[in-house]
Image (cartoon, rainbow, N blue to C red):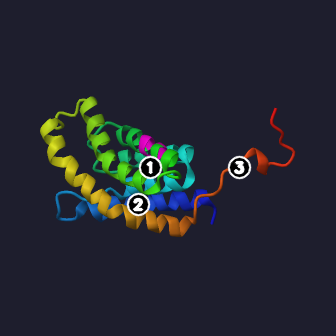
Amino acid sequence: MPRILLTTLLVLTALVLQVTVVNRLPVSVVPDFVLLVVIALGAIRGPVAGATIGFFSGLGADLLPPADHALGQHALVLCLVGFAAGRWGERWPLLTVAACAAGAPALALAVSGLLGDPGIDLRTFEAVWPMAALVNLLAAPVVVWAALKMYGPRPEKATAAAVPGWRRT
């Protein structure tokens, strides 16, 4: 299965699962599976693909109900997180996944506050962020493992030595 089709299938599955099942659970804080899929795919595919996947996944999350925030807010957050996961995922995979999974809710709350969301202040941040980071950290290994099983290892980067006829000047 081509990687673009597999990526689209994973993101759409995460979006539908998040909206129809996870967000309706009778608990106050749930993991963000769209975020975790973006982190996993960014770590596997690299920074440019991670940012692109994050942007379109975030745009999908912005458009699906309940959309009670500014359009593009999740797209910005997931684009930055996908880039960071792709940039540092090869060098420090576990640390990168943990930092992105824990830091993304803080970034999302900061962007909400900057965009003027009246329900976001320091008390909200202190109440929401630790639990959101914890549930994302607990769910991250499962999602990353599943993405790695579907994708396989990260493809090797092409170097100048791998391209026939390429000479450094």
Residue 141, quarter of the rendered image: bottom left
Query: Measuring 57% from the left and 66% from the top, which residue is drawn there?
Result: 152
Residue, disc 2: 14
Q: Is residue 65 visible?
A: yes
Residue 125, quarter of the rendered image: top left
| Name of the residue lying farthest toward the left | 123
Sequence-first disc among 3 and 2: 2
- Give the amino acid type for the residue marked by disc 3 in the picture: Ala
Sequence-first disc among 1 and 3: 1
Give me the C-alpha separation between circle 3 and circle 2: 31 Å
Report if the CB atoms under discs 2 and 1 are less than 8 Å apart: yes
Front residue (pair 135, 27)? 135
Q: Residues within 10 Å of mark 1 (few under 14, many from 20)?
A: many
Residue 5, quarter of the rendered image: bottom right
Mark 1 element type: helix
Q: Is residue 53 visible?
A: no
Instruction: Tell me, yes or no, whether the highlighted magenta stretch contains residue 105.
Output: no
- Give the amino acid type for the residue marked by disc 1 in the picture: Ser
Q: Residues within 10 Å of mark 3 (few under 14, many from 20)?
A: few
Q: Which mark is residue 57?
A: 1
Report if the CB atoms under discs 1 and 3 are less than 8 Å apart: no
Give me the C-alpha separation between circle 2 and circle 1: 9 Å
- Give the amino acid type for the residue marked by disc 2 in the picture: Ala
Residue range highlighted in magenta: 79-83
Residue, disc 3: 158
Quarter placement of the C terminus: top right
Query: Measuring 23% from the left and 29% from the top, which residue is drawn there?
Result: 116
Front residue (pair 104, 162)? 162
Give me the C-alpha separation between circle 1 and circle 3: 27 Å
Q: Position of residue 3 (x, y in %)?
A: 60, 59
Q: Position of residue 45 (x, y in %)?
A: 56, 53
